[in-house]
Amino acid sequence: MSNPSLLILPGDGIGPEVMAEVRKIIDWYGAKRDLAFDVSEDLVGGAAYDKHGTPLHDDTMAKAQTVDAVLLGAVGGPKYDNLDFSVKPERGLLRLRKEMDLFANLRPAQCFDALADFSSLKKDVVAGLDIMIVRELTSGIYFGEPRGIIEEGNERVGINTQRYTESEIDRVARSAFELAMKRGKKLCSMEKANVMESGILWREVVTEVGKEYPEVELSHMYADAGAMQLCRWPKQFDVIVTDNLFGDLLSDAAAMLTGSLGMLPSASLGQPMENGRPKALYEPVHGSAPDIAGQGKANPIACILSFAMALRYSFDMGEEADRLEKAVEQVLADGKRTADLLGEEGVTPVSTSEMGDAVVAAL
Ligand code: ATP
Ligand code: MG
């Protein structure tokens, strides 16, 4: 049997810095657990634009289609802000998501005990929190046509279109129900059916799919009310399913429940491949963080936990994923903190590479 294959795309900003720490962990698995991965590495985002004049080379795209999993760091940065939209770093990531057809974005918001004090919310609100947001990722307002800035009369108009087909809603709803079946059997669907046609259709289709999952307790919430409930009492939720735009916002808000953007992994899953496992791309929720790039300050845990999700969902190595997550928990319990995890004075932060080394040591 061939080794599981992994394509690493470090990208821009802190992407390469946090990915270097994941490399240490992959090396540890090779040396100590005899788990060999076929790892290849390539460029994406601004780094790819600098070399090839495009944020994702066709060869890289082709490679991504054949591997068991892609692990991506982050893309973008101020250097690329004035580029034409068609070659912006973010387009590289959008193309990967679109062509791999990764329609379900899984974002866990999990509170590590050691960080419960650090949340902006009261400890009892977040302690033990373990929810999963499923965000539709390949459609909606970020892709809908028509789009653009047009002249109308004597002024310009910016246009984006929210568009969802029944089948697009159906497949992401199914992913969410399947996930709910494996978890707390509770699913909350969020849209704005009160003011959006796509929201009305969303609610109808999710309700319809729900009839096939009678064991799952399904509820619906307007996304703005959902945002409020997420901050008020997040433990009322288990799995949340929502569209691309609302999912973007809600999962960033959920991120702060757990302490830092630097802690949150994500998985983007598509249709099953020949081996039965879904096409998959794993990446930290955070971006390229240009404000701290190159300073050894970035928290590598989000990227490390993204690799743990790859172990679980793409490589069928659930026990090894547990091992890695426990190692992270151990390091946090020992008091190791990167700067983003420090509110109070008196504790000296560890660097990106010290955090990576600590996780390897805990393994
Ligand atoms: P994007 O548009 O790519 O999502 P963004 O501008 O929304 O990027 P991030 O790049 O995620 O946001 O950064 C938001 C803030 O969080 C920044 O202040 C950044 O320094 C901080 N941050 C993000 N990731 C990390 C990390 N891994 N470790 C420490 N701080 C982080
Ligand atoms: Mg962002």
Image: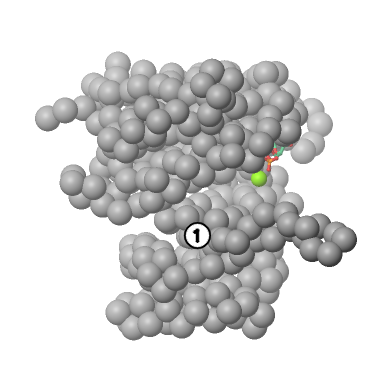
In the image, the residue with mark 1 has its CB under 8 Å from the nearest atom of ligand 2: no
Residue 219, position as x, y percentages in the image? 50, 79
Q: Residue furthest right?
A: 154
Residue 294, position as x, y percentages in the image? 67, 18
Quadrant of the snapshot with the C terminus? top left
Residue 4, position as x, y percentages in the image? 25, 31
Is 58 located above or below residue 111 in the figure? above
User: Is residue 221 at all visible to an observer of this figure?
Assistant: no
State the residue in front, 14 or 346. Answer: 14
State the residue in front, 1 or 40. Answer: 40
User: Is residue 296 at all visible to an observer of this figure?
Assistant: yes
Element class at badge 1: loop
User: Relative to 326, is 143 on the left or the right?
Assistant: right
Q: What's the residue type where badge 1 is placed?
A: Ser
Q: Residue furthest front?
A: 153
Quadrant of the snapshot with the N terminus? top left
The quadrant where residue 215 appears: bottom left
Q: Which residue is mark 1?
A: 139
Residue at screen point 30% across, 42% down: 314
